Amino acid sequence: MSDESALLEQLEFDPDELRARYRAERDRRIRPDGSKQYHRATGEFGYYVEDPHADPAFTREPLHDTVEALVIGGGFGGLLAAARLRQAGLRDIRVVEKASDFGGTWYWNRYPGIHCDIESYVYLPLLEEVGFVPSWKYSPGEEIRQHARAIGRTFDLYGQACFQTEVTGLTWDDDACEWEVATDRGDLVRARYVVISSGPFSRPKLPGIPGIEDFRGHTFHTSRWDYDYTGGGPDGGLHRLADKRVALIGTGATAIQVVPHLGRDAGHLSVFQRTPSLVDVRDNRPTDPEWAASLPPGWHRRRRDNFLTLVTGGQAEEDLVADRWTSSARFLQDLIPNGAGREQGLAAEIADFRKMNEIRARVDEIVADPATAEALKPWYRYMCKRPTFSDTYLQTFNRPTVSLVDTGGRGVERITANALVVDGVEHEVDCIVFATGFEVGSSLFDRTAMRIAGRGGTTLLEHWQRGPRTLHGFYSHGFPNLFHLGAMQNASSVNFVHVLDEQAVHVGEVVAEAEKRQAARVEPSAEAEQRWVARIDAQDTSAQHAFHAECTPSYYNNEGAPTGRSFQYAGGPVEFYDLVARWRAEGGMDEVLA
Ligand code: NDP
């Protein structure tokens, strides 16, 4: 008997049946308008992105000065870049941020229940540098936001930062070897180095539901939570909703954290579901102070590396984090099948079916009403969507004041002045909360209004007209001293802040070397850039493509239309950062410093 038939013999389920169910569920969610189905939060929807935390009357005089480095974005990416540049010896570092403080995602997202979905001891960056150990295994959002602010203080970034400011243009001055940076507040700042870290989750999106603009009740997006309307705060206590009928649209990672609070406090909560999330055990607990006090120097890097290795299919003697991320990765061998040439064979698929059966069985164990339980079961493979973790989400559907309105994969049909329509039935509500996510697939040029003109006036948009062109994702030919942080032509991980730190360390080391050699420019040659682009284009991404093609639509697979092209290094982050470290050690700097 072959290994495959032996494997199939022992199964307690029929894989063909599951495959057919997954396909049917995917097919009824595929829409011809794909990622174009969403509304951008601009124009008539612009109020959805207004900043509830900033002073709208804030003004200041325009700046006309020079700094050594200017960092665009004050989330963890920008903070890490600034911190690593400080460690590289730069004195004048200005972070420009459109919010009124540091924090990025954690500045904007303050919805009730907000928590880190990765263990905080590996998610929060610069813990040893700041001298902080998070108080919970999965920190509440406010603790993470305060940590971002602490990084700002520790690395002395507040003094020169510009908040409530957006960069509108970057122009390279080849004679002075500096960038001229223009902003929407009339600033003209000159900087030797510029780092762009504008973040993939910075623009909320709204669902393309007909009639969305007709609604006359109250409405907001989870990333701009309206506590004036709901009462309470990120820890809950939404007392002003006691007499309100609330609709929540969306059931992704955000909704999973919000629903237990809305369910507890709203007069009535209706959760409008298009696709159920996969909800695994959370098991959050406070940090043991003795453990925190016993951590030896270097613990943070060791723990983060250990997590990264395990969730990307690598081997480690110990599992330091030991949660559902790492146990699932061990079980499934590799969370995201993006390793070049790594086959997604039958064994991996069977392990996935088993894991998802366990997830579906958990729904039956928790949810009392059988029809509601059935509707809450996810029918797709693990990592088709970001897995979620909660010990209170599914339980909320047992409350008499909470209803699940399952739309059978089609989404809400229509919105009227006072109701949401599904299958012709009107559900009247006072308030709609949109937990419908962010413009993840959009490019830097869609997300920002920034015009970047490099040497000779060529814009970055022109240089990238047939796709991004960089060396290692960091820099482009013709755009000296300009660094990009992000996954593009670089690497990614479920713990993205760790990836951002690896990137910031690289940028810091390159800049330190440029300073040491008194190099005026950091810039890859056209040939080095072309070699990297060709290498990214030539990667074997067939396993990843095959996986995503079978998945239910989401931003992971371009809403059901995977392109088959990878914009990331397919070998995964561990291999990539090894490659970059070797590049630095083996004379790579000579390629970019002049
Ligand atoms: P998502 O994009 O994950 O979810 C959007 C939700 O809106 C989906 O359930 C989607 O359904 C639904 N939706 C879209 N259009 C419609 C429609 N027309 N009718 C009904 N429903 C609709 O956004 P999130 O904000 O939940 O999460 C975004 C990302 O933010 C996560 O993937 C995660 O990376 C990150 N995050 C991280 C957290 C952390 O703790 N670190 C916490 C929360 C989020 P469908 O699935 O069918 O498309």
Image (tube, rainbow, N blue to C red):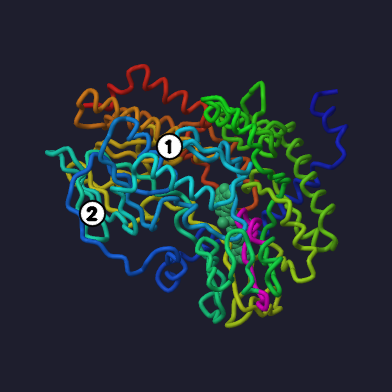
Q: Is residue 31 visible?
A: no
Residue 489's disc number: 1
Part of the protein shown in magenta: 242-259
On screen, 475 above or below 460? above
Q: Nearer the viewer, residue 188 or 555?
A: 188
Q: Quadrant of ligand 1?
A: bottom right
Q: Find disc 2 in the rendering and name its residue.
A: 182
Answer with left or right where residue 542 lies relative to residue 198: right
Q: Amino acid at mark 1?
A: Gln
Residue 207: in magenta span: no
Query: How many numbered marks appear?
Result: 2
**Which quadrant of the structure image shows residue 429?**
bottom right
Q: Nearer the viewer, mark 1 or mark 2?
A: 2
Helix, strand or loop at label 1? It is: loop
* Residue placed furthest toward the left: 175
Residue 254: in magenta span: yes
Q: Is residue 367 visible?
A: yes
* Residue 430 x %, y %: 62, 79
**Which quadrant of the structure image shows residue 307?**
top right
Quadrant for the C terminus, please: top left
Q: Nearer the viewer, residue 525 or 346?
A: 525
Residue occupying image coordinates x 76% and y 71%: 401
Mark 1 closeness class: few <14, some 14–19, many ≥20 residues within 10 Å: many
Residue occupying image coordinates x 36% and y 22%: 584
Q: Amino acid at mark 2?
A: Ala
Answer with left or right where residue 150 lies relative to residue 67: right
* Residue 189 x %, y %: 21, 49
* Residue 13 x %, y %: 85, 42
Helix, strand or loop at label 2? It is: strand
